[in-house]
Each structure stands twice: as C-alpha cells, then as structure tokens.
Image (cartoon, rainbow, N blue to C red):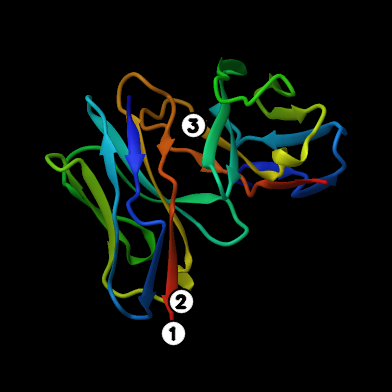
C-alpha cells in the first residue's frame, strides 16, 4: 500500500533563507506526486505536481520539487522564503493507474522567522 | 469559476445534536471527496463519490456519520448524534472529468465545534 512520510512536522527558517521540506513515499507502482499548501484558516491549494518526464518540477510562488525515484523522495525547495510563505505544506501521492484516492502526508508547518 | 463551496463555514453545536455540512463541487467535476482535519490525526479521507455514487466509505469513523450526493452539484455530510470528539475542520474537494491525474480542488472548509 502506498504511504507518504513527511519527516519534519515543523521547520523554522529565517526570512530570505533557503528551505527544503522533505517527503518520502512508498509505492510499488508508478505514482503521481503533489505538494499542497494550506494557509491559515484556508483550504488546501495545489503548489505543484509531478506526473512524468523532467524530475524537476516548478510550481507557484517560487517553489520547486525534485522527484527522485531511486530514493522515493519528492522534496520541496525554495531558494529564498518570504513571510507570506508561512503555512502548512502537504506532500501527497496517487498511484497512477489503479487508485482514485490521493494519500496525504501529515504536513510540515513552515515558520518564517523575521 | 467559484471553486468548491462549503457551508456553513463555522458550526457550533451541542453534543447530541444533528449536524449537516454541505458542499457544492466545481461544475463538471465527477469526483467528490470529504476529509476531516484535526491536529492529532492530520487530514483523513472519510468518503468519496464518483458520478454521485459512493465508491469508498472506509474512512467514515462510525455509523453516526453519513454522506449523500443526490446530484452532481450537491453533497452533504451528516453527523447524528454529534460528539465533542467530532470537532474538526471538514473539507470537501472535487476532481475534474477526464483528468487522469485526479488533481483535487479543495473548498475552504467547515470548522465544527461540538460542546
């Protein structure tokens, strides 16, 4: 069965510093991978997605993620964070062929320090 | 497009009362998902529908929870009777027809407090 592990529940980082949010998944078949962002008191919105092809995926707000099949990882990065990036970030996976459901990780809360 | 619409945005009720949460998916989307989010358990899938038919309700916590989708533009999640441990934010999400990726579009959520 597929699963998603977000290794850090909280990540503090200074404004304008780079950040990496880690995500590992387990699945025996090919997958689609997603990062969603949830701003305070809002629903989740899609940040970026990996379907196939280039392993480096660019999303909104300057975020990007790299798919690494051998390490079954899909880490999210941003070279310089802003206070407005304060949010919770969810990694998610869907098996590309046989499942309609997206499995979400438990989330990583990003704290931007002034 | 207005996006996924949920109502009410906030609900406060007393233990034992019936609660009904409502969702209007994006027009043309054929999948609808109900999630519950709590600090302790994170984001949990409760049930999902395809073309108004429930496909998987294995995440529904117990018989007190029920969900319906009478037509393509409306779904309800009902809790009867409600208990304090049902306090959470409930999200509805929908996915478009023919999208092999099944990207989900989330509503703003309903914050339920059961006292």
> Mark 3 — residue?
B96
Indicate which disc, 2 or 1, sits on the residue closer to the N terminus. 2
Mark 2 element type: helix
| A58 to the left or right of B28 | left
Tell me if mark 2 has few (under 14), some (14-19) or many (20+) residues whose alpha carbon lies within 10 angstroms of its own: some
Which residue occupies the foreground of this view, B18 or B28?
A: B18
The label number, if any, that marks residue A81 in the structure image: none
Mark 1 element type: loop
Q: CA distance from mark 3 to mark 1?
A: 40 Å
Q: Report in which chain the residue with disc 2 lies.
A: A
Which residue occupies the foreground of this view, A6 or B25?
A: A6
| B12 to the left or right of B108 | right
Residue B12 x, y percent position in the rendering: 83, 48
Q: CA distance from mark 2 to mark 1?
A: 8 Å
- Badges 2 and 1: C-beta atoms under 8 Å apart? yes
Closer to the observer: label 3 or label 2? 2
Residue A68 x, y percent position in the rendering: 16, 45
Tell me if mark 3 has few (under 14), some (14-19) or many (20+) residues whose alpha carbon lies within 10 angstroms of its own: some
Q: CA distance from mark 3 to mark 2?
A: 33 Å
Residue A17 x, y percent position in the rendering: 30, 78
Residue A25 x, y percent position in the rendering: 28, 39
């Amino acid at each position: 069965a597929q699963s998603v592990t977000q290794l850090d529940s909280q990540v503090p980082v200074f404004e304008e510093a780079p950040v990496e949010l880690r995500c590992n998944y387990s699945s025996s078949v090919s997958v689609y991978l997603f990062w969603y962002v949830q701003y305070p008191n809002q629903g989740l919105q899609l940040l970026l997605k990996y379907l196939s092809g280039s392993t480096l995926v660019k999303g909104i707000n300057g975020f990007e993620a790299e798919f690494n099949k051998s390490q079954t990882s899909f880490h999210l990065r941003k070279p310089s964070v802003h206070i407005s990036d304060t949010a919770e970030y969810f990694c998610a996976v869907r098996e590309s062929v046989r499942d309609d459901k997206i499995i979400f990780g438990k989330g990583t809360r990003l704290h931007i320090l002034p | 497009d207005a996006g996924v619409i949920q109502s009410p945005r906030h609900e406060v009720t007393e233990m034992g009362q019936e609660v009904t949460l409502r969702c209007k998916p994006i027009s043309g989307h054929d999948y609808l998902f109900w999630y519950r989010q709590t600090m302790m358990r994170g984001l949990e899938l409760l049930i999902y529908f395809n073309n108004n038919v429930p496909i998987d309700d294995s995440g529904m916590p117990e018989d007190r929870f029920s969900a319906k989708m009478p037509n393509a533009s409306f779904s309800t999640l009902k809790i009867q009777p409600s208990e304090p441990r049902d306090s959470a934010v409930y999200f509805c999400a929908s996915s478009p027809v023919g999208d092999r990726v099944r990207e989900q579009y989330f509503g703003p959520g309903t914050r339920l407090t059961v006292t």
